[in-house]
Image: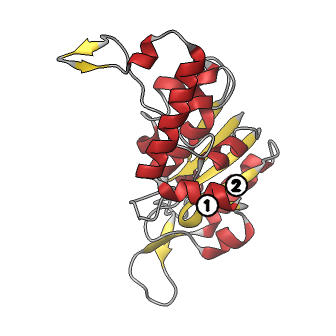
Amino acid sequence: MRIDILTVVPELLESPLSHSIVGRAIKKGLVEIHVHNLRKYGIGPRANVDDYSYGGDAGMVMMIEPVDRMIEELKSERDYDEVIYLSPDGEILTQAVSNELSLKENLILLCGHYKGIDHRIREHLVTREISVGDYVVSGGEIPAALLADSIVRLIPGALTDETSALSDSFQDGLLSPPVYTRPADYKGWKVPEVLLSGNPRLIHAWQDEQAMERTRRLRPGLLEKTDNQ
């Protein structure tokens, strides 16, 4: 898989994409992640990528030309499955979305900044818009890193134990059950006996029960979605 990220602040993406699971996946050759500075195609001697909005609204808007030229350059080298704009207006990022995108070969992630991007980019260049939640952050860089992380960890070989992702929250529409490790008794706080039983059938039944109970208590809306499908 290859992920190209277009941004005006590439420095914000250096650390999140260089360490932990994503960093190891890159070193293993499982994924390529390339961060592109849109100022490469900035306008004028100062390589401007933003300008005042028509209509006089407050805030600067990212211009269409630098984005179009960068996407055109990338598309001349390979085909892309999606050009994704990280936007609070987009579909909410879910595990199902990450699962779907992890099967793609080439993705472009466009990070907005300032007041947003010229709407013609969304109309003519972007194929999909994704939001990480109903709130606004300073730019699309952190959401892009989050999306990339959620995708990369699903690529076979990215996790040391590939079955680990199968038990993550939301994979089956439920929150994951509680997990524990040694010691079995700390300050009188004990690990549930069933997990020490060595009986896989009892353990799996307990985990299923806990997943359902936690979801019903903490995120009942997930059960409603499952019931409506």
Front-most of residues 139 and 36: 139
Query: Disc 2 or disc 1, which is closer to the eye?
Result: 2
Q: Amino acid at mark 1?
A: Pro
Residue 144 in the image, given as x and y percentages of width and height? 53, 48
**Residue found at the far left of this picture:** 187
Residue at the spot 40% in from the left edge and 76% down from the top edge: 59
Nearest to N terminus: mark 2 or mark 1? 1
Q: Amino acid at mark 2?
A: Val
Residue at the spot 61% in from the left edge and 40% down from the top edge: 171
Q: Quadrant of the N terminus?
A: top right
Is the residue marked by circle 1 packed among few (<14), some (14-19), or many (20+) residues within 10 Å?
many
Mark 1, residue position: 66
**Circle 2 SS class:** strand
Is the residue marked by circle 2 packed among few (<14), some (14-19), or many (20+) residues within 10 Å?
many
* Mark drawn on residue 79: none
Residue 181, quarter of the rendered image? top left
Relative to residue 105, is residue 139 depicted above or below? below
So how many labels did they put on this image? 2
Mark 2, residue position: 83
**Circle 1 SS class:** helix
Front-most of residues 174 and 201: 201
Residue at the spot 66% in from the left edge and 47% down from the top edge: 96
Front-most of residues 96 and 215: 215
> Can the viewer see residue 111?
no
**Residue found at the far bottom of this picture:** 55
Relative to residue 155, is residue 72 depicted above or below? below
